[in-house]
Image: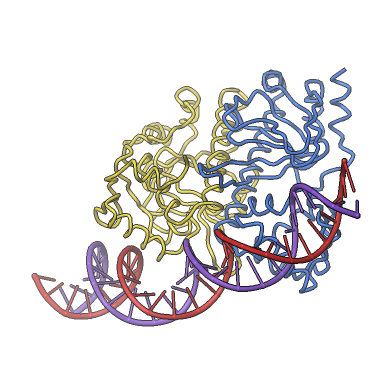
Chain colours: A blue, B yellow, C purple, D red
Amino acid sequence: MSADLATIATRPLVPPSQPQPKMSGELAALDPVGVVVSFARETTVFLEGDPAESFYKVVSGAVRSCKLLADGRRYIADFFLPGDFVGLGGGRHHFTAEAVSDTTLVRYARRSVDRLIGEQPRLGKWFLAMLSEGLCSAQTQMLLLGRKTAQEKIASFLLAMAERTGAGVQAKLPMTRTDIGDYLGLTTETVSRTFTQLRHDGVIALKGLNEVRILDHETLVELAGEG
Amino acid sequence: MSADLATIATRPLVPPSQPQPKMSGELAALDPVGVVVSFARETTVFLEGDPAESFYKVVSGAVRSCKLLADGRRYIADFFLPGDFVGLGGGRHHFTAEAVSDTTLVRYARRSVDRLIGEQPRLGKWFLAMLSEGLCSAQTQMLLLGRKTAQEKIASFLLAMAERTGAGVQAKLPMTRTDIGDYLGLTTETVSRTFTQLRHDGVIALKGLNEVRILDHETLVELAGEG
DNA sequence: CGCCCATTTGAAAATAATCAATGGAAGTGG
DNA sequence: CCACTTCCATTGATTATTTTCAAATGGGCG
């Protein structure tokens, strides 16, 4: 039963355009141990410090991973969209994962997967590749956080989201402005102001609150400042 | 020949106090494929984009990994001290690695190690653990970059360096103030000013430019703001 | 229709960056 | 051995970006 659902679940209706390690063969092996689970908006998938007994693949919706400081300041390490994996990495979870919107996930029990890795070395390599990719994007994000201006951060974010959710020309933003701020190391107000400015400059257009059309891709790339 | 040197090299004179995955058995298997190499201060170990044909272990000295923006702004993703591994992660290197001071490393050819992983599954797990740990510290650093004040950044940095280089009571700083700034997302001036302030407050004392004694550990932990 | 919540906008304040100059230690060469 | 050079760190004054505090707008939903 769960096997059937999981098999369906690993072929998301919205294919991720984010570059990923090729996963055809290796991932098929994961299907039989996956279980579909659902989380309502703003609920917790797992907590920082929990033993990492499972990891998850996003089927629909979105998940954020976050860390808190003592006084409540929050940092969002990443957003996970359909096709992305959350909670890889062993031992204990080193961040809290929460559903940004109503979300469906496939849960994989680590114990079962560890056994599979023993049988299929390629699956182990796939894990290495996934972690390696995560490390790479973490470092790109650190460069952004440490050295980019507010405008450069927003431009980079919009370009990345457009790449992941809208074929590069349109970005869906399932998260709030506060979430975006916590992801980019800015306040809600600064996020909002920067959006407004880009809109006035004719670089982007808002379609409602949660969708952005990129009108001038070239300028946005320049503003992102990566050279 | 190279095997002997590598065997010596993997038992650094200064043992790292940084928490690491237990490495006794797995790492012994690496020794025979390691070659000792040296780099002068401020020279390049490998460049961002280079095919990742090797990774390295620091024997003595220090290495920094960095990324650049188009206009020259720099971000240092990490410092690597004796006992640390640089350049794990497959495909291509996603950052440039440079020697902070005169440095001795052990180079491991990835091809040889891939073969070893095939024979010894535990080595594969060790790789996963190392990458997972790297991801965890990257996320901690992102929280610091995105949400901490200059003083909190410096306090956190000094505590971490003291843990790694001086049993928690004393921190050796082989890098320049500019390096520290590029690591914490600050300017040289702000780093210097914050050091001065902590010194005036009696929290730390400088022994020369490259060594810091922690006088009031408790206060420094509070200033680091992790709760 | 009206409430609620997120977003937007505005004004003031603060943190850190920038610009500029001085100080000091290490290393070089006479 | 000393003077000179160079590089790095420190200090000061000013500027600017972003945050903070506060209020208003607006969209979605019951």
Q: Nearer the viewer, residue A114 or A41?
A: A41
Picture layout, residue A122 above or below residue A17: above
Picture layout, residue D2 above or below residue B21: below
Of the 4 image quadrants, the one containing the N terminus of chain B is top left
Query: In which quadrant of the rendered view does residue A215 lie?
Result: bottom right
Left or right? Give the position of A212 relative to B184.
right
The residue sitting at 73% across, 42% down in the picture is: A80
Residue A44 visible somewhere in the drawing: yes
The residue sitting at 83% across, 65% down in the picture is: A205
Spot occupied by residue B11 in the image (x, y as percentages of width and height): 37, 32
Spot occupied by residue B141 in the image (x, y as percentages of width and height): 52, 47
Spot occupied by residue B104 in the image (x, y as percentages of width and height): 39, 46
Left or right? Give the position of B16 relative to A219.
left
Residue B68 visible somewhere in the drawing: no
How many marks are shown on the rendered structure?
0
Q: Nearer the viewer, residue A47 or A54?
A: A47
Q: Nearer the viewer, residue B11 or A111?
A: A111
Query: In which quadrant of the rendered view does residue B48 lie?
Result: bottom right
The residue sitting at 42% across, 62% down in the picture is: B178
Spot occupied by residue A184 in the image (x, y as percentages of width and height): 63, 54
Left or right? Give the position of A64 relative to C1.
left
